[in-house]
Image (cartoon, rainbow, N blue to C red):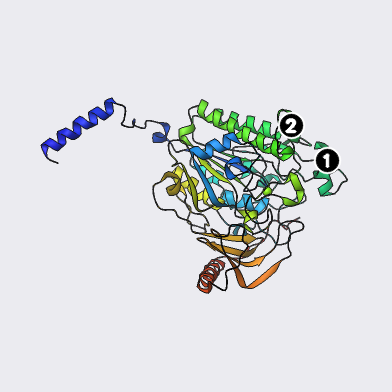
Amino acid sequence: MDGQRFWRAVVMAMLLAAWGVCPPARATQADSRPPNLIIIFTDDMGYGDLGCYGHPVLDTPHLDRMAAEGQRWTSFYTAASVCTPSRAALLTGRLPVRSGMASDRRRVLFPDSLGGLPQDEITIARALQQAGYATACIGKWHLGHREQFLPTNHGFDYYFGIPYSNDMDNVSGLGGFRANYPVPQVEYFNVPLLRNTEIIERPADQTTLTRRYTEEVVRKIEAYREQPFFIYYPQTFPHVPLFVSEQFQGRSAAGLYGDVIEEIDWSVGEIRRALEQWDLADNTLVVFTSDNGPWLPYREHGGLSGPLRDGKGTTWEGGMRVPAIFWWPGQIEPAVIREIGCTLDLFPTALALAGVELPDDRLWDGYDLSPTLLGTGPHQRDEMLYYRGTQLYAVRQGPWKAHFITQGAYQGGAPRQEHDPPKLFQLDHDVPERFNRAEEFPEVLQRLQALADRHRATVVPVESQLEKR
Ligand code: MG
């Protein structure tokens, strides 16, 4: 740079600084310590159940605002279409078929189950705890209710919540559907509420769960504010039976389901408020997503999968594509992200943000999403594997999805059917998976089959924990 240009640059920089144009130096906690992480994981919320995902009636202002300020992903998936394997995948970054958390006979854990997430699996909580994070799990666990499997034995310093689904321990004498719909009662479900490993209430008063979960999360944010923390908040709802606190009863034009979603939205708003109150928002990544699609047979007590086909329990898009919002003011590039993401990716993303190396003693199924979140590099994931139990039913690469096997959603869906040749859908052109293109694009089909074969070769059968009782 010649002398004249140098001085011109100096004068310009001084003028910009005087006008306040130059960004202030970022002297925040981000410089000195790794970011906090909060994962909010709803149960059975569908792709179409938020205002920002197109629901015409539901009022979700807090989540809509966080989506606008952060990233709203439109091709984000859960790794399984039912509760237990979905949670195992999120927390371990590994497909449930690798950890024994998948089964073709019993798809989730029940109160009579003896199994749980094996001790040699590493959860996000365990990895971050070892890196000096404070960790808490507040909500529905569903990865084993015997003491050795509870959150406090899987890397969490603290646990408050119910150990399995809120419709279990049905003591009403009514069948599942009749107990859950249309007017469930708290006393129908003898579900325990735990603090750490102790039962503190039984049956849990489900009408106050969302409020109490929220208070617990807010309290932990305050308690942990001087150190990096990870709070995992797996919501009990909108899984049936639906319950809300008095304050939210009858509020939503969308009925009881709407009341439940609006209380969850309030809960998210309270968490945001706590982060802002303690000046932690610019050093905390908040992730909001769902464990699987909506439970459709429960009529208006089940949610909506929006334009997607089918719901909970299936490998059609409605079972596994879920809402996903990432919020981290000042760090995340606000955008709508159409690239593929998966709950499996939260493990490597969390470790990358915390500056922790992935252990090299096992296979991982996730990708680090931080380049996409922070705008620092190319997007990593271009494919999706759709499992039902231990079997690979479908694969996606880019916009193309091949179904080797299809089976409808829980209770009343279409029966299991193998497809040879597989069915092929172009998901960007055909969001609801209606038009089979297999005959027109044999080379695409071949590519997807090769992807499935390469993946299958990496899977070693393990004993299922879900079948032990
Ligand atoms: Mg679920």
Residue 326 position, x and y percent, is: 51, 42
* Residue at the image point whose x is 77% and y is 45% from the top: 167
Residue 179, label in figure: none
Can you give x and y, in whole percent of width and height, for residue 90 in the image? 58, 50
Q: Which amino acid, by three-letter code, is at mark 2?
A: Gln
- Please tell me which residue is depicted at 69% across the width and 44% down the height of the picture: 147
Which numbered tag is attached to residue 249?
Answer: 2
Is 284 rendered above or below residue 370? above
Q: Taking the image as drawn, is residue 161 in sight? A: no
- Relative to 178, is 44 on the left or the right? left
Secondary structure under tag 2 reads loop
Q: Residues within 10 Å of mark 2 (few under 14, many from 20)?
A: some
Q: Is residue 44 above or below residue 22?
A: below
At 68% across and 31% down in the image, what residue appears?
212
The residue at 76%/56% (across/down) is: 411
Q: Label 1 belongs to which residue?
A: 188
Disc 1 marks which amino acid?
A: Tyr
Image quadrant for the C terminus? bottom right
Q: Disc 2 vs disc 1: Cβ atoms closer than 8 Å?
A: no
Q: Is mark 2 within 8 Å of ligand 1?
A: no
Would you say 373 lies left or right of 314 here? left
- Say what secondary structure mark 1 lies in: helix
Circle 1 Cα neighbour tier, 10 Å, few/some/many (<14 / 14–19 / ≥20): some
Q: Is residue 199 left or right of residue 100?
A: right
Name the residue nearer the viewer: 220 or 430: 430
Please identify, in this view, whether the residue under mark 2 or under mark 1 is nearer the observer: 2
Say which quadrant the N terminus sits in: top left
The residues tagged by marks 2 and 1 sit, at their Cα atoms, a distance apart of 19 Å
